[in-house]
């Protein structure tokens, strides 16, 4: 097979692009793109299916394109208003990539692609704007095939035996897909393709977009810098991971970071200068296995993290019994940054208790004491009805000398207007500093090395100092 490939490549390379285009336009019979695709796809699949599915290098890509080009030329195939090179590119994209979704999956400024059905696709941009695409798949089966190709990268198979699948396309592109019988046959497939790149956001972007104010962001960065663990809470698409990813980029180079993510990697924190790594980061991923002994979950990785002398541990998302290990880490001298699904700041600590009970069935009050000590600061983020993301609240849980808790709202986003006009949500509001941090948190900051001048600046960010 290798010899055949080489001989074909030599033959194809002897034909100049100019002669191809001239011959193509003069002799080609105009046909519909779908007809050409079906014919070429049948040929390539029968001859070179393994090459398409198993190879993703530039060499393989060029080789497949040459096979397509030769077939198109040999059989005088042509499509109206498309040159031969354009036709070959379109055929390759449809067969080996992801149809019209390719340009959105790898496009700039795109955060999520939602396939509601084969003929209903939406794209959400990082600005919060969501647009329905005019483009659609040719049929339910076509939609299923394209999503299957995406999942193939992570070794996942979407079929009748496994109609609900989680996979990834790359380290920062996550895919959740459903097919019949979970969704209706005529829908074809429903899929959520999330493209996450937290470091694309800068401090100025959060401020300009109204997500948070500079004092709020400064406060959170100082918390991580001086040993105060933080949990970012919210629903899906509220911006939790984006905020957490940015906060980690503010960590000084000499602080060792250990990240733990579930299934696919969204964080990319390694910094280089003149080709050399300047900071200290270890990125890790969970690995699911049907063999329980080979399964590596977040709980296992948290235990491993403690053996790597980290100063900051990032648990990508607390969703199970690893919550107990996370709070233990936070209470034993490590700074922990994590995210969690929750619907308010106060509800976040109760959610942590629920997750911790999956590991140890302890009394709720005992667990509440542990998680509030471990995570004194909780941030609640939300995507509003107008698709704008706002940091709705930063709250401190102060533990009083008698063991009771005092929930202190430090910052809030206060909505002054929320109405619908011509089908659009008009929402206005502003961030307000509500209270200053507690005396106990001030003491912790000082014990962890915060200079007095920095503490005075933080105290000036809120309302009452104590």
Image (cartoon, rainbow, N blue to C red):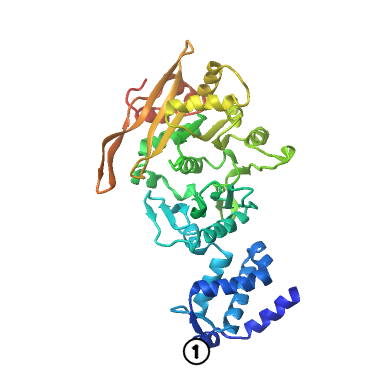
The image position of residue 269, as x and y in percent, is 55, 46
**Based on the displayed image, in which of its 4 quarters is residue 359 positioned?**
top right
Residue located 45% across and 79% down the image: 80
The one nearer the camera, 351 or 424, is 424
The image quadrant where one finds the C terminus is top left
Residue 138, image x, y percentages: 48, 64
Q: Decide if residue 325 is on the left or right side of residue 402.
A: right
Q: Position of residue 421 (x, y in %)?
A: 24, 46
Q: Is residue 132 above or below residue 370?
A: below
* Nearer-the-camera pick, 53 or 455: 53
Q: How many marks can you see? A: 1
Q: Position of residue 231 (x, y in %)?
A: 49, 32
Q: Is residue 100 visible?
A: yes
Mark yes or no: residue 176 visible: no
Give the quarter of the figure containing the N terminus.
bottom right
Residue drawn 38% across and 50% down?
A: 127
Q: What residue did someone put label 1 on?
A: 26
């Amino acid at each position: 097979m290798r010899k055949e490939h080489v001989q074909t490549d030599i033959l194809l390379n002897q034909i100049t692009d100019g002669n191809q285009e001239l011959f193509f336009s003069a002799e080609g019979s105009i046909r519909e793109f779908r007809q050409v695709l079906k014919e070429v796809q049948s040929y390539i699949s029968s001859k070179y299916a393994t090459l398409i599915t198993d190879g993703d290098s530039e060499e393989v890509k060029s080789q497949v394109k040459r096979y397509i080009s030769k077939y198109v030329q040999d059989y005088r195939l042509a499509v109206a208003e498309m040159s031969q090179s354009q036709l070959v590119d379109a055929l390759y994209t449809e067969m080996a990539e992801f149809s019209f979704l390719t340009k959105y999956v790898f496009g700039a400024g795109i955060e999520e692609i939602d396939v509601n059905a084969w003929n209903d696709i939406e794209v959400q941009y990082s600005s919060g704007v969501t647009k329905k695409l005019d483009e659609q798949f040719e049929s339910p089966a076509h939609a299923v095939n394209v999503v299957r190709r995406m999942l193939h990268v992570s070794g996942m198979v979407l079929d009748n035996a496994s109609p609900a699948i989680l996979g990834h396309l790359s380290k920062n592109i996550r895919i959740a897909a459903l097919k019949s019988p979970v969704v209706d046959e005529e829908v074809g497939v429903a899929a959520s393709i999330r493209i996450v790149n937290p470091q694309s956001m800068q401090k100025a972007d959060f401020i300009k977009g109204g997500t948070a104010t500079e004092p709020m962001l400064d406060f959170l960065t100082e918390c991580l810098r001086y040993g105060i663990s933080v949990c970012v809470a919210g629903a899906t698409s509220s911006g939790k991971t984006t905020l957490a990813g940015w906060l980690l980029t503010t960590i000084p180079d000499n602080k060792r970071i250990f990240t733990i993510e579930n299934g696919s990697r969204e964080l990319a924190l390694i910094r280089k200068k003149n080709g050399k790594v300047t900071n200290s980061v270890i990125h890790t991923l969970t690995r699911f296995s049907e063999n329980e002994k080979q399964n590596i979950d977040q709980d296992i990785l948290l235990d491993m993290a403690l053996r790597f002398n980290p100063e900051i541990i990032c648990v990508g998302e607390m969703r199970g019994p690893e919550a107990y290990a996370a709070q233990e880490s936070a209470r034993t001298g490590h700074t922990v940054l994590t995210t969690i699904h929750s619907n308010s700041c106060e509800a976040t600590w109760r959610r942590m208790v629920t997750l911790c009970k999956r590991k140890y069935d302890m009394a709720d009050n005992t667990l509440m004491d542990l998680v509030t000590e471990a995570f004194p600061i909780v941030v609640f983020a939300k995507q509003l009805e107008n698709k704008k993301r706002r940091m709705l609240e930063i709250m401190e849980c102060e533990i009083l000398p008698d063991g009771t808790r005092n929930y202190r709202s430090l910052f809030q986003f206060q909505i002054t207007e929320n109405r619908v006009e011509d089908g659009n949500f008009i929402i206005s509001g502003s961030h307000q500093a509500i209270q200053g941090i507690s005396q106990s948190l001030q003491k912790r900051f000082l014990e962890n090395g915060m200079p007095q001048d920095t503490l005075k600046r933080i105290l000036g960010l809120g309302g009452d100092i104590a």
